[in-house]
Amino acid sequence: MKFPSSLLSLTRFLLLLPFFSSAWLDFSVATNTQPQPQYHDLLHCLCSQEDAICNLIYTAQNSTAYASVLQFSIRNPRFSNNNASSSSSRTKPIAIVTPTTIPQVQSTVLCSRKHGLHLRVRSGGHDFEGASYASLSSPFVLLDLVNLRSVTVDVPSKSAWAQSGAVLAEVYHSIASASRTLAFPAGLCPTVGLGGHISGGGYGTTLRKFGMAADNIRDALLVDADGRVLDRAAMGEDVFWAIRGGGGNTYGIVVSWKLKLVRVPLRLSAFTVSRTASSDAEMTKLVDRYQRVTDKLPDDLMILVMIGAVDQGNSTKQVLQAAFQVMYLGGKERLLRVMNESFPELGLKEEDCKEMSWIESVLHFANYPSNSTYDVLLKSRTDSPISFAKLKAKSDYVGTPLPESALQGIWSRVHQVEAGAALLHLIPHGGMMSRISDSSTPYPYRAGTVYKIQYYVAWSGEQKEVEERHLGWIRKLHEFLTPFVSKNPRGAYANSRDLDLGMNDPTGETSYEQARVWGEQYFKHNFERLARVKAAIDPSNFFRNEQSVPPLSM
């Protein structure tokens, strides 16, 4: 594979996914050529509820649009219909329902449950493991929230009601249209669905100032397994706690969220500066300094780092490059003073710094052309600046800066041919994240976390051996870092779902003890509470996937 000559190009090839959503499965999607026994019963049940919903149901048997509707929100080509490289097969939905109203969501839940079909729910389609639109167990119905994407902003109360099918671009556009000094602290990638993003935590460039997306939710509307629509008061504080970071497709279907908006300055500093190392030792020195200061910087300042190997001119040799994504809620003069005091090794200059509005920073970090207006966000579903490659991701948390030997070991592996297009993304914590309790939401990585590492490897080609080579590479890198990252349990991010950590039984009969293997890596001590909440709101385990939380009865 030919490598990009800069990390800005590489991130247009790789999908910037650490801010939003879940991971994918190690197998391709099998085609259902025969209707399942429940197929006709489901259609009759839904259409008997409301005539309009009949036009919102897509199946391989009754609609030529079925394939295009299924493919529309698949953001990883690894799981497209024409990909034959994955190692085993799984099933597609027997039906896709695209409701336009909440009552249609209720009908879909009730009819699916009545006829023995479990549901998968898709918001933006950014599952690393494809768990929202394909399954190891069959049959199932895909409830696609693509038509439930309204956003209503109330400036005086600094809040907004946003439906789960809205992508972040649409949320940001609505907020900016109402106010230039309000924002929502969520991710960078414009095509990420709001529902999945918040369900796993969700974070972006203001993480250290305002916390996660899930930390900034005031209310929600949940459709439970009995088809009831519950707000925060009706669902109770335990369920409200669980849906804000405890994983999607587990407790019910959150159809809408009440967002707490945050105040941002009219002008702030946002830019990306790249540093190419003349040697691996030079990169080690730069990253070592970064990891020792990044969680201690002022809350208003967040510096994310992307690291990868890039081409060196016409040479076949590759060099390491780090792209520093800087977000500061203030002017560049103050930023330069802070950086020169805390991180002079970066060598930041005044000409590197750019001031802009919050919504302009959204466009910048999403890689839109510099002359774009924010209306381009409304085209994000069909005209995104980010390309989507076949990829695999893993995550870790760092509580003590990595020693030089660990950094050098990473670089040596990034240079390997098997790495393909590999990228490491470092996401700093500290600031507000250290002041929020580790049980405030299910996301437990608060005080004591210096930064999170997100690993990506991407590739092209249809050959199975190509895929296996890249999967082997990222798994070996993850194994190598075992002594240097969080322990007992080793941490992982729920929105970077990694099925290498373990899976539920396809029958839905997974025990709590079985699920602890992966569940405590995502949620630590919060996993037991999540399982008890699950038992209270969905004791029959109707809402489930390969890594949903199983019920734990008292």
Image: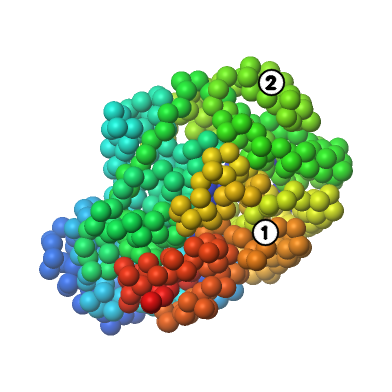
Given the image, on which type of amino acid does mark 2 rest?
Arg
309 sits left or right of 511 in the view:
right
Q: Give the residue displayed 54% in from the left and 40% down from the top.
A: 432
Q: Which residue is mark 1?
A: 486
Q: Quadrant of the C terminus?
A: bottom left
Q: Can the viewer see residue 497?
A: no
Q: Is residue 211 above or below residue 554?
A: above
Q: Position of residue 491 (x, y in %)?
A: 61, 60
Q: Are marks 1 and 2 in contact (CB under 8 Å)?
A: no
Q: Secondary structure at mark 1?
A: loop
> Which of these two is toward me, 426 or 144?
426
255 sits left or right of 81 in the view:
left
Mark nearer the N terminus (1 vs 2): 2
Residue 345, quarter of the rendered image: top right
Q: Is residue 111 above or below residue 331?
A: below
Q: Can the viewer see residue 406?
A: yes
Q: Secondary structure at mark 2?
A: helix
Structural crowding at the residue carrying mark 2, measured as other residues with C-alpha within 10 Å and reported as few (<14), some (14–19) or many (≥20):
few
Q: Which residue is mark 2?
A: 337
Q: Give the residue displayed 24% in from the left and 57% down from the top.
A: 234
> Which of these two is toward me, 403 or 280?
403
Q: Position of residue 462 (x, y in %)?
A: 61, 64
> Which of these two is toward me, 394 or 335?
335
Q: Position of residue 416 (x, y in %)?
A: 80, 57
Residue 349, quarter of the rendered image: top right
Given the image, on which type of amino acid does mark 1 rest?
Ser
Q: Position of residue 532 (x, y in %)?
A: 40, 70
